[in-house]
């Protein structure tokens, strides 16, 4: 499972690099489908990942507002900073935790820790597909979704 998180992080970093080549107005313009703009989608992916990982650990959710001060650089900084914390947690992961139930602060439902991790992997891949469509609409070649050839295993 860690290999798929590493895959998502590699692809995310490639998207962040591609976005540096796009005009700022492309990054913040509302898009059809998804959660809004390209920049907000990247922020959303990072925010959701971090929130759920903290939830699994029974830690409080950290709310970072997405407002006019949010930039591509700031999104990248959040991704890098939070990734280090997430890596530490994942490297300590035990398969015994897969079926442990947790409740997070923003939901009354109970989820297994393993279910949450798998959701996070699928969630990011889903949004990367949306970014691919938007990139093509804007005349950019999207980042490859291939797992093969990335040296993850």
Image (cartoon, rainbow, N blue to C red):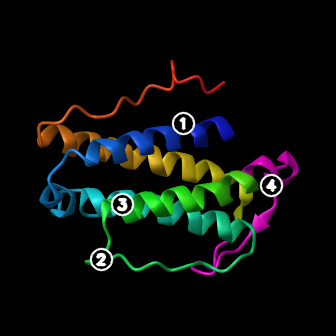
Nearer to us in this view, 105 or 151: 151
Query: What span is colored magenta in the figure?
Result: 90-110
Q: Earlier in the sequence, mark 3 or mark 4?
A: 3
- Judge depth for marks 3 and 4 and give the one in front: 3
Residue identifier under label 2: 69
Q: Are marks 3 and 4 in contact (CB under 8 Å)?
A: no
Rounded to the nearest angstrom, the CA distance separating label 3 from label 1 is: 21 Å
Nearer to us in this view, 111 or 6: 6
Residue identifier under label 3: 73
- Residue sitting at x 54%, y 36%: 7
- Judge depth for marks 2 and 4 and give the one in front: 2
Residue identifier under label 4: 99
All told, the count of numbered labels is 4
Residue 124 % position (x, y): 46, 49
Q: Earlier in the sequence, mark 1 or mark 2?
A: 1
Q: Is 102 covered by the magenta stretch?
A: yes
Rounded to the nearest angstrom, the CA distance separating label 2 from label 3 is: 11 Å
Estimate how packed mark 2 is, as few (under 14), some (14 to 19) or many (20 or more) residues with alpha carbons within 10 Å. few
**Secondary structure at numbered mark 1:** helix
Nearer to us in this view, 129 or 108: 129
Q: Is residue 139 above or below residue 100?
A: above
**Secondary structure at numbered mark 4:** loop
Q: Is 43 covered by the magenta stretch?
A: no
Residue 131 % position (x, y): 29, 46
Q: Are marks 4 and 1 in contact (CB under 8 Å)?
A: no
Residue identifier under label 1: 7
Query: Does the image show residue 34?
Result: no
């Amino acid at each position: 499972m860690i290999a798929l998180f590493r895959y998502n992080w590699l692809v995310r970093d490639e998207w962040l690099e591609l976005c540096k080549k796009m005009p700022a107005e492309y990054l913040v313009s509302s898009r059809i489908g998804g959660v809004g703009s390209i920049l907000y989608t990247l922020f959303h992916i990072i925010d959701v990942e971090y929130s759920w990982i903290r939830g699994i650990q029974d830690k409080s959710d950290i709310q970072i507002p997405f407002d006019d001060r949010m930039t591509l650089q700031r999104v990248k900084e959040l991704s890098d900073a939070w990734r280090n914390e997430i890596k530490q947690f994942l490297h300590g992961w035990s398969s015994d935790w897969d079926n442990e139930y947790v409740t997070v602060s923003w939901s009354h439902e109970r989820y297994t820790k393993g279910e949450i991790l798998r959701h996070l992997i699928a969630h990011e891949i889903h949004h990367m597909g949306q970014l691919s469509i938007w990139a093509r609409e804007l005349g950019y070649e999207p980042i490859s979704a291939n797992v093969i050839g990335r040296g993850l295993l």
